[in-house]
Image (cartoon, rainbow, N blue to C red):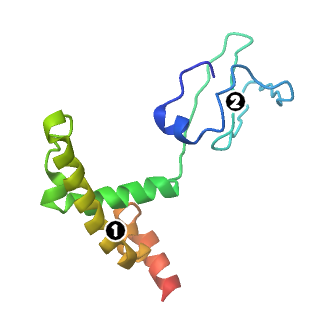
Amino acid sequence: MGLKMDPELAGYAAGPLPTEMPSDATEVTLGPGSMLFVHRGSWHCTEAITDALSLNFTFSAPTWIDIFSTVLRSHLAHSPEWRQTADFVSNPERYHEAIDKFNRMLAELSYEAPGWRAEQFLGTTETDEVVSKISSIST
């Protein structure tokens, strides 16, 4: 709250970020030895009302965006063309060349994508054990 929204979040946020907690927010007071679990995506703020030491452990299970972007990057990294430096993208004289090249590369990728299956890619983001379980379920 009170910070500038990052560009990715701004792309899908329904409006500006709140500047303060809503009046109907739940307030939780923790004592010594207490622990609180806050779900992903929950708005929250913290305040120590006395001298305190707190530890914050974050465990973030991957989202589908995380998995797909990792899979896509891994797939594209095998292509010498995708690994090339896009050095002329910011050159106004070569901008149309950049557009043409990128459109061609995207068209090739979209031709490949319909044949992709999750079983081919999950190993790039998950352990072999998870992939084995998924494969045994799907066969």
Residue 40 locus on image (x, y percent)? 63, 44
Which of the 4 image quadrants contains residue 46? top right
Asked if residue 77 shows in the view, the reply is: yes
* Amino acid at the residue labelled 1: Ser
Q: Is residue 40 left or right of residue 116?
A: right
Q: Residue at x 30, y 56 (%)?
A: 73
Residue 85 locus on image (x, y percent)? 14, 45
Which of the 4 image quadrants contains residue 32? top right
Residue 59 locus on image (x, y percent)? 54, 44
Instruction: Return the residue nearer the eye: 42 or 57.
Output: 42
* Amino acid at the residue labelled 2: His
Q: Is residue 22 left or right of residue 87?
A: right
Image mark count: 2
Q: Are marks 2 and 1 in contact (CB under 8 Å)?
A: no
Q: Quadrant of the N terminus?
A: top right
Asked if residue 91 shows in the view, the reply is: no
Q: Residue at x 27, y 57 (%)?
A: 103
Q: Is residue 109 left or right of residue 17?
A: left
Residue 44 locus on image (x, y percent)? 69, 30
Helix, strand or loop at disc 2? Answer: loop
Helix, strand or loop at disc 1? Answer: helix
**Distance between mark 2 and mark 1 Cα atoms:** 40 Å
Instruction: Return the residue nearer the eye: 112 or 49.
Output: 112
Q: 10 Å neighbourhood of mark 1: few (<14), some, or many (≥20)?
A: few
Instruction: Return the residue nearer the eye: 111 or 50.
Output: 111
Q: Residue at x 77, y 26 (%)?
A: 30
Would you place residue 1 above or below residue 67 in this image? above
Residue under circle 1?
110
Residue under circle 2?
44
Would you place residue 20 above or below residue 99 in this image? above
Q: Nearer the viewer, mark 2 or mark 1?
A: 1
